[in-house]
Image (spheres, grey):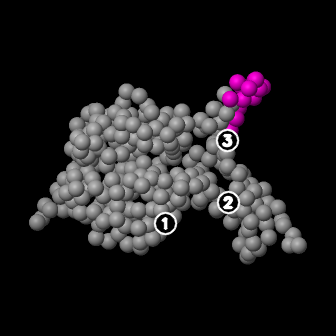
Amino acid sequence: MYKVKVYVTLRESVLDPQGTAVKGSLHSLSYGEVQDVRIGKYLELTIGKSNRNLDGLVREMCERLLANTVIEDYRYEVEEVVAQ
Amino acid sequence: MRFAVIVFPGSNCDVDMFHAIKDELGAEAKYVWHTEGSLEGYDGILLPGGFSYGDYLRSGAIARFSNVMNEVVKAAEAGKPVLGVCNGFQILLEAGLLPGAMRRNQNLKFMCRTVQLKVENADTLFTGAYQEGEIIQIPIAHGEGNYYCDEETLAKLKENKQIAFTYHGENPNGSLADIAGITNEKGNVLGMMPHPERAVDILLGSADGLRLFQSIVKHWRESHVVNA
């Protein structure tokens, strides 16, 4: 079994209105050091063993559903979970 | 002319759409549940607004994989008129029937009021009853109507006259190039954030939306009843 952690973020070329609002709020809390805030999504998939290639599978799921590649980028990490 | 009003779990403008077609336009309309596997016998397809699947993940992202969407794609390929309003527009974008994507409104607010639209292209099957450059009053009601596409796509939209409507006077959501509604290249699929089905009677504040539906019917009659 695998635990796959997927991070979906807005592409850098796409303005992030939520991130901009949060940055403004952090600035007003006197964290002037903050230069940029980008808000994204974090998804955890638990995937059972199969004959299909895991990377291919995760990439396919990201491209088809989990991310909208017109405005979003994605990356993921795979952890193997040992059954207890 | 028979219209299908597609209903997803979470659609909430389906009844308004049905009313606009049946009572105001005077055409036939039927609700079609998202699990349906056929749209045979329908001449026009309407995807109403709402919050399909609670807008989970992204607006329209889950609805676009519904059973009925395969049929919507086929209808679009066959040249039938397909109109997506608000969440319907978002679903058409997710399905790839229209280019681009929606972001949260620039001011992060859900905007719900009547806005002015400029008819950018009166030479589509959806806009034939308007004058080019005409300013019309149509309500908006959305939190994610901030249209985005890359520069190349925007240039193509302009070149092919695919921008049907733009916001006039003020841009309520930050939408790129003030875009309120676009068609596909062939011109038979229209997606728009404003709600024409909510502007079909003076009692509702505006009847400017009715002409959009009248345009569809007029175009359909002209292309189907010629040999009658």
Label 1 neighbourhood size at 10 Å, few (<14), some (14-19), many (20+)? some
Could you tell me if the residues under marks 2 and 1 are in contact, i.e. CB atoms within 8 Å? no
The quadrant the C terminus of chain B occupies is bottom left
Kindly identify which residue carries mark 1.
B66
The residue sitting at the right extreme is A84
Q: Specify whether disc 3 shares its chain with disc 1.
A: no
Q: Which mark is residue A59?
A: 2
Does A3 sit left or right of A84 as displayed?
left
Q: Position of residue B161 (x, y in %)?
A: 35, 41
Query: How many residues crowd mark 2 within 10 Å: few (<14), some (14–19), many (20+)?
Result: some
Judge left or right: residue B147 versus residue A58: left
On screen, residue B221 versus residue B86, left or right, reads left
Q: Which numbered tag is attached to residue A74?
A: none
State the extent of the magenta-drawn residues as a range.
A25-39
> Circle 3: is it few (<14), some (14-19), or many (20+) Cα within 10 Å?
some
Q: Quadrant of residue B156?
A: top left
Q: CA distance from mark 3 to mark 1?
A: 28 Å
**Does mark 1 fall on the same chain as mark 2?**
no
Task: Note whether A28 is above or below A55 in the view shown.
Answer: above
* Chain under numbered label 2: A
Residue B193 pos. (x, y %): 41, 44
Estimate the spatial distance between the alpha carbons at disc 2 and disc 3, rounded to whole Å: 21 Å
The x and y percentages for residue A34 are 75, 29
Dot placed on the residue nearer the N-terminal end, 2 or 3: 3
Residue type marked 2: Arg
